[in-house]
Image (cartoon, grey):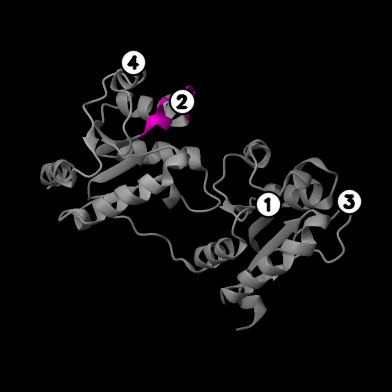
Amino acid sequence: MKNEKRRIVFVSAHPTDRYEYLAPVIDAIEASGECVAVYNPAPRDEGDTIPEGTELFVIIASVKYFTWKNSGYLSEYAAAKREGVPVLPIMIEGTSNTVDLINMRLGKLQYIDASENLGFAMDTLRAYLNATEREVDRSLPSVFISYRKADKPALYELVRIIGSSPSYSKINLWYDEIIAPGENYSAAIMRELKGCDLFILLVTPNVLERGNYVHRIEYKTARELGKRIIAVEAERTDRQALLEMYDGLPRCVGIKQAGALYSVIDEIVERRG
């Protein structure tokens, strides 16, 4: 396949981040078979642009990229923004500062996290580049799982349990890891909250942390929208504290009580049908 028929993906990075990360990112893009990777081989502090027809702008995201003077953020990203090119951050530093800078400078975009496992992140990048648009049957009822990031092991266990439900093929199961890289995650979460038929709150002591996103945004929005809510307790949590913080929270179902969870899913399927 000739390069001119492949999608152009531009890679932007701070000069000092190129040594370790530029080659694997380029290799992952080229390995997709659908894209050609492009970058400025001799970046300047200003004046650099991106090729005409660029379809995706990939940022190797670090604190330096956003805060130190460099052509990546000052010129290349400015050109991508001006031309309306979709942006995909690949975060190479697992710090709150980097996440905050991505949110402040790029908007609240879903990023690929390469801070702990670069190989897995590159697999994610290749899968993203090869993926066709995800088809979602909106005629099916939707189940939204709300959870704290620290509770990912419990999330995966809950997803596994729901996946064993007899009605699993008749629902759309959604949680934030399904958000496509580069998509505005706040907009995606609001879209799915508005469309969901069942809101599941995954309960552990982590949901009692004051000011957390689950309580402040997701649960509050589900209540305001009048969504059906079920609380699934993965780790024993103070019931009184839960009720004080989560107004109107129903009694928790234990994560191992699959039958109770399945009956609720069956009910929303029957109601939609």
User: Mark number for residue 45?
Assistant: 3
Which residue was labeled with disc 1? 83
Answer with mark 1 or mark 3, whichever residue precedes in sequence. 3
Amino acid at dot 1? Glu
Which residue was labeled with disc 4? 244
Answer few, some or many: residues within 10 Å of disc 1's Cα (few below 14, many 20 plus, some between 14 and 19).
Answer: few
The secondary element bearing badge 1 is classed as loop
User: Mark number for residue 209?
Assistant: 2
Answer with mark 3 or mark 4, whichever residue precedes in sequence. 3
Q: Nearer the viewer, residue 147 or 14?
A: 147
Q: CA distance from mark 1 to mark 4?
A: 48 Å
The secondary element bearing badge 4 is classed as helix
Answer with mark 2 or mark 1, whichever residue precedes in sequence. 1
Q: CA distance from mark 2 to mark 1?
A: 41 Å
Compared with 64, 51 (above or below) is below
Q: Quadrant of the N terminus?
A: bottom right
Answer few, some or many: residues within 10 Å of disc 4's Cα (few below 14, many 20 plus, some between 14 and 19).
Answer: few
Answer few, some or many: residues within 10 Å of disc 3's Cα (few below 14, many 20 plus, some between 14 and 19).
Answer: few
Q: CA distance from mark 2 to mark 4?
A: 12 Å
Q: Is residue 91 left or right of residue 120?
A: right
Which residue is rendered at x = 15% and y = 44% of the image?
272
Magenta segment boundaries in residue numbering: 204-212
Q: Residue furthest front?
A: 236
The secondary element bearing badge 3 is classed as loop
